[in-house]
Amino acid sequence: MTRTPEQTELAEITRALLSKHADSEASRRAVATDLAYDAEVWSLLCEQIGVAALVVPEEYDGVGATLVESQVVLEELGYALAPAPLLATTLAVAALRLWGTEAQRTKWLPRVAAGEVVTVAWPDLAGGLVLDGPSASGIFAVGEAELTLVDQPCVVAPTMDQLLRLGSLCGMDESAPAQSQVQVLTAIARSLIAGLQVGIAQRGLDMTVDYAKQRHQFGRPIGSFQAIKHRLADCLVLVESARSAAWSAAQVAADVLDGGVPQSALVRPAAVASSYCSEALSAVAAETIQLHGGIAITWEHDAHVIFKAAHSLGQLAGAPHVVRAALA
């Protein structure tokens, strides 16, 4: 994969902002709030970088970028272990662009571009749970013919992953959406989640490499032992391979959203990216815990955040073995 200079700059300025305003302590304070993310950091991301407006077309006050750029930012959010509603809002924008009415797009897309949190519900996501539902000002449901605005309360659903806030709708209409729409929205979600997983895996690998240089046993850094080198090298291969799979899926997702290819073209690359990135992150998270030792299971260390995220994101849009079985 090769990023354009603009995509590289987007990644750099996002990482710089997050390193300044969304360190580990700030993120831990944020997840304890009702929003479960730092509203000030989200506002800075929207105002200074325009992350919420990336895939909103220019005629609706957006940036007019693609889902590739959204995945670039999601990877940086994953690397920073910073909770933010970007995944939810990007999926909502995709649904509005693909199936929303002109009236819905005119009303909601400029609000999303300005940083308002809007989300979408569909049955394939975490068994019908809603990303950032409790804090969203609007929740759309994928219906049989079009998107509908949900008028039911959304309550917090317990989750062990502090990077995700899920909600459960009370009394939602059970009318079944068109299977093709569900399949496409799930594929877009998988391509975006893959970027988030790559960022978290890269953070875990970097943390572990740094620790292996600092931790001494038998008078030398543990990173100098061949067995440790091999395990870290295996993690690097997993991360880079996962990044390529995620990037490939994002490219197709961008083409689908722009109408350049049939919507069904995304299903397979998104499934490949989802299953591979989920397993890669799980493997890296396990090595992060193992090679850090006892400190990794303390609340003060970030290793447990990576471990929890690996398990939750790996189930969010379908467990890897289930995703692969569906392709057979």
Image: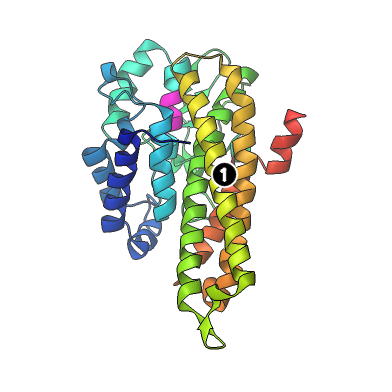
**Observer able to see residue 123:** no
Residue drawn at point x = 56 percent, y = 60 percent? 307
Q: On the image, which quarter does residue 129 sit in? A: top right
Q: How packed is label 1: few (under 14 Cα within 10 Å), some, or many (20 or more)?
A: many
The secondary structure type at the circle numbered 1 is helix
State left or right for residue 321 relative to residue 85: right
Which of the two residues, 83 or 128, is positioned nearer the viewer here?
83
- Which quadrant holds the C terminus? top right
Q: Give the image location of residue 158, x and y in percent.
A: 54, 53
State left or right for residue 58 relative to residue 291: left
Q: Compared with residue 222, is residue 10 higher up or lower down, i.e. above or below?
A: above
Q: Compared with residue 257, is residue 89 higher up or lower down, i.e. above or below?
A: below
Q: Give the image location of residue 118, x and y in percent.
A: 39, 33
Q: Give the image location of residue 254, x and y in percent.
A: 46, 24
Which of the two residues, 309 or 100, is positioned nearer the viewer here?
309
Kindly give the residue lying farthest to the bottom in the view shown.
219
Q: How many marks?
A: 1
Q: Compared with residue 282, is residue 317 higher up or lower down, i.e. above or below?
A: above
Q: On the image, which quarter does residue 143 sit in? A: top right
* Magenta-drawn stretch contains 92: yes
Residue drawn at point x = 44 percent, y = 72 percent? 300
Q: Give the image location of residue 181, x and y in percent.
A: 58, 20
Residue drawn at point x = 47 percent, y = 74 percent? 213
Provide the residue span drawn in magenta.
89-94
* Magenta-drawn stretch contains 13: no
Q: Main secondary structure of the magenta part?
A: helix
Please name the colour scheme applied to the rendered image. Answer: rainbow
Which residue does the numbered mark 1 point to in the structure image?
242
**Observer able to see residue 316:** yes
Give amino acid for label 1: Ala
